[in-house]
Amino acid sequence: MVSIDRVYQKVLALANKEQRGYITPQEFNLFADHAQMEIFEQYFYDLNQFKRLPGNNHEYSDIVSIIKDKISQFEVWAIQDNITVLNEYGDVNLEDNIPDSYRLGEVSRESIVCEQLSPKEYSLRSRSSLTKPSNSRPVFIKYNNGYDRIKIYPHPVNSDGTPITVLDPQSPRVRADYTRKPTKPNWAYVVINNKPLYNATSAVDFELHASEEAELVYRILSLAGVAIEKTQLSQVAGALGSAQIQQEKQ
């Protein structure tokens, strides 16, 4: 976790230095959410990049471990959660069931892991009795019809073979593991004498690893510089960020 008030105070101190501009709490909260998501999404690109490097260089392996550790706190293992199947055709609306989902992991049906296929792969497999999905080899596909959904094959049915219904408590259990999005940060405040004062009770800290504090400051400064049309602020943020990267590489 990273204290949102500590980041806010650092951002204000750097932004106000030499009168480079003032950032309101509302602006800061918008920039904070955007910066956190940028850093969070970069984890997955970096992980993919370093995992593709050839050889067994321990330095790269350490970096992969570090990135995985940063992502791990957002992984949700749905051991007890039951996913609601919408209809007898095996449709699951992801936004209703796991609205905070960023990346879907394993999907299981009655404790059997479903293999994910593309629509084309499913079409090819279903043509053969040897490869088509079965209760012992279930699969699912992802699609979007205005909502992010998955479709499970074979379609889940009740133990007596009848189609399931949404309200049927005996419906086959469908579970999903996923990586959730970070909670939206919020520098909460109360206005006293026309000045915003930090309200720790209602504030929401950044959920990123503590090592990301400096990166959050630089990214928010850069965003603020563009918003208030202060190119110097963006340049300062860029210079600080470059210095941080060089230090990490040493």
Image (spheres, rainbow, N blue to C red):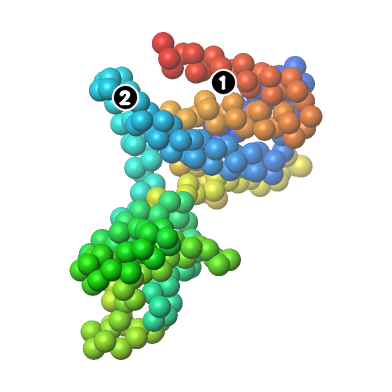
Q: CA distance from mark 1 to mark 2?
A: 28 Å
Please determine whether, in this image, residue 13 is positioned above or below residue 164: above
Please determine whether, in this image, residue 241 is positioned above or below residue 2: above
Q: Where residue 112 sits in the image (x, y, percent)? A: 22, 64
Q: Is residue 222 left or right of residue 114?
A: right
Q: Residue at x 32, y 56 (%)?
A: 106
Q: Residue at x 50, y 18 (%)?
A: 245
Q: Where residue 174 sits in the image (x, y, percent)? A: 31, 69
User: Residue 198's mark?
Assistant: none
Q: Give the residue pinned by disc 2.
A: 54
The residue tagged with tag 2: helix, strand or loop? loop
Quarter occupied by residue 85: bottom left
Q: Quadrant of the N terminus?
A: top left
Q: Residue at x 67, y 33 (%)?
A: 223
Q: Is residue 34 left or right of residue 131?
A: right
Give amino acid for label 1: Gly
Would residue 9 be seen by someone viewing this image from the given angle?
no
Would residue 57 be seen by someone viewing this image from the given angle?
yes
Give amino acid for label 2: Pro
Task: Name the front one of labels 1 and 2.
Answer: 2
Q: Give the residue pinned by disc 1.
A: 241
Seen from the viewer's position, the closer of residues 127 and 116 is 127
